[in-house]
Image: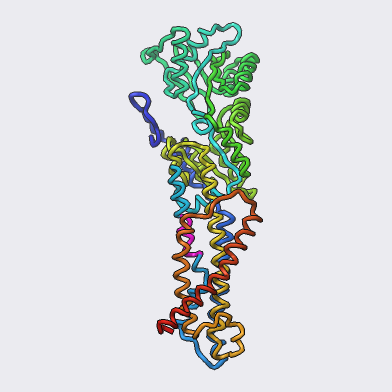
Amino acid sequence: MTGGTRVISDWIKVRVTSDPGHTFLDRMIALVEGAERQKTPNEIALNILLAVLTLVFLLVVATLQPFAWYAGTEIPVPVLIALLVCLIPTTIGALISAIGIAGMDRLVQHNVLAMSGRAVEAAGDIDTLLLDKTGTITLGNRQATEFVPVSGVTARELADAAQLASLADETPEGRSIVVLAKDEYGIRGRELADRQSVFVPFTAQTRMSGVNLNGREIRKGAADAVDDYVRANGGVASPEVQSIVNRIARSGGTPLVVAERTRSLGVVHLKDVVKGGIRDRFTALRAMGIRTVMITGDNPLTAASIAREAGVDDFLAQATPEDKMTLIRREQGEGKLVAMTGDGTNDAPALAQADVGVAMNTGTTAAKEAGNMVDLDSNPTKLIEIVEIGKQLLMTRGALTTFSIANDVAKYFAIIPAMFILAFPQLAALNVMRLATPESAILSAVIFNALIIIALIPLALKGIEYKPLGAAAVLRRNLLIYGLGGIVLPFIGIKAIDVALVAIGLA
């Protein structure tokens, strides 16, 4: 229950209710359990390709024996098995794990822990990045900087009421209100335990907190929530308060309205600071084709101001955990891959649903368990390095897949003519490598198949150098270098092994 909670006072009180299934924690658990990550397009395409090639070569090998019987000969079963091992896509199948492990290792060098190679691969294909504002885009510790009263209320009266409503609020914001009231107006915190006071805790539903004291009901919270509270008690919303709220929000601050039952007293100005250099990082992400969206519980005006300052492409204001999930699923429904960075328990469902969920190391345990990556430096713009490593992984796998397919096709045309040349002398025209015997052809292919996998492991681990090229340019390069190389190298390698086997008398 207290996982990820930091104790900033001398005790924690936990109240257990008899209403299961309706608490914040229950809702978070239900959302996380309902989250499901989709397979990436590259993963689906590779699985289909490998499955199709495997079926094709299975059919080829299965039909060789009937052809042999028709020709009046017979192919030994061990030879068919060896041929199948050589022809099915064993090369890329053996290298996929090495490529994924190498991608995870490169992330570790950037202080990012990935739970699987699949997560690294998905990072290379993301289209949309969602970032929680507080603690991710901003430093996270908003501080009270100003008390702005309405007409007829002094700043001291507003400070006194705001401090009373914040005495039980152990958040950085609440403590900063108490400190500001003390520093600006000499109002010291009071012990209210013996005054029959009842503190009202903040909840995501009410978006208010406060205190009931000696017949007074003081509340502080989001402007619209406090406005509804005042109206519900028979009061009238203050246009002046809305004007102050708009001014603070447009400046990038967070307005916290303070009210006493039927009237608003004024606004507390909270400021949050955008992390240095983050705007340039978002510009780099935009150049990579990634759309950035800031997620915040702030009102739309404040969110718009922070979004402009940070340089994100869009924002979602007054967001609940359900809103984040809805946004992610909508993006995924449009065929996009989504990455999410966050640090709070309320981010856990979104981190679990996102294709790439990057949890900050300074975040809660729930967030880190829901994500499939953990940034040990708690730097949200680290996603630039994560994306580059993911794209490098995809480029490496694409290049080696091209080589593997070309390699398997080349082995097919190199081995089959040699196997049937005795039964069908006409196939001698296709036996371009002039392999010594059918047995030598099979043995040479098996040895080459084993050696080429070992030879490619260092390339799989090092990875292809990432360059911001278009898909067409990458395809051309793969076909020219790895496709052509995959065709030529087996002919050279198998022939060299065949010559060596004949020289030492094994064929």
| Side of 248 where 115 appears, left or right | left
Q: Is residue 128 above or below residue 165?
A: below
The quadrant in which residue 256 appears is: top right
Horizontal and vertical percent position of residue 259 = 54, 15
Can residue 197 be seen in this snapshot?
yes
Please tell me whether residue 42 belongs to the stretch shown in magenta: no
Can residue 81 be seen in this snapshot?
no
User: Residue at coordinates 57% horizontally, 73% vertically from top-left?
Assistant: 410
The quadrant in which residue 451 appears is: bottom left
Q: How many numbered discs?
A: 0
Horizontal and vertical percent position of residue 124 = 56, 49
* Quadrant containing the N terminus in the rendered view: top left
Please tell me whether residue 96 belongs to the stretch shown in magenta: yes
Q: Is residue 287 above or below residue 145?
A: below
Q: Nearer the viewer, residue 192 or 137?
A: 137
Q: Nearer the viewer, residue 275 or 141?
A: 275
User: Residue at coordinates 63% horizontally, 36% vertically from top-left?
Assistant: 313
Q: Is residue 172 above or below residue 76?
A: above
| Side of 68 where 447 appears, left or right | left
* Quadrant containing the C terminus in the rendered view: bottom left
Check the image and name the residue furthest to the front.
503
User: Residue at coordinates 47% horizontally, 55% vertically from top-left?
Assistant: 462
Task: From the image, give the main secondary structure of the stretch colored magenta.
Answer: helix
In the rendered structure, which segment of residues is drawn in magenta?
92-100
Horizontal and vertical percent position of residue 503 = 43, 82
Horizontal and vertical percent position of residue 93 = 49, 64
Q: How is the image coloured?
A: rainbow
User: Residue at coordinates 49% horizontally, 76% vertically from top-left?
Assistant: 496
Check the image and name the residue furthest to the bottom.
72
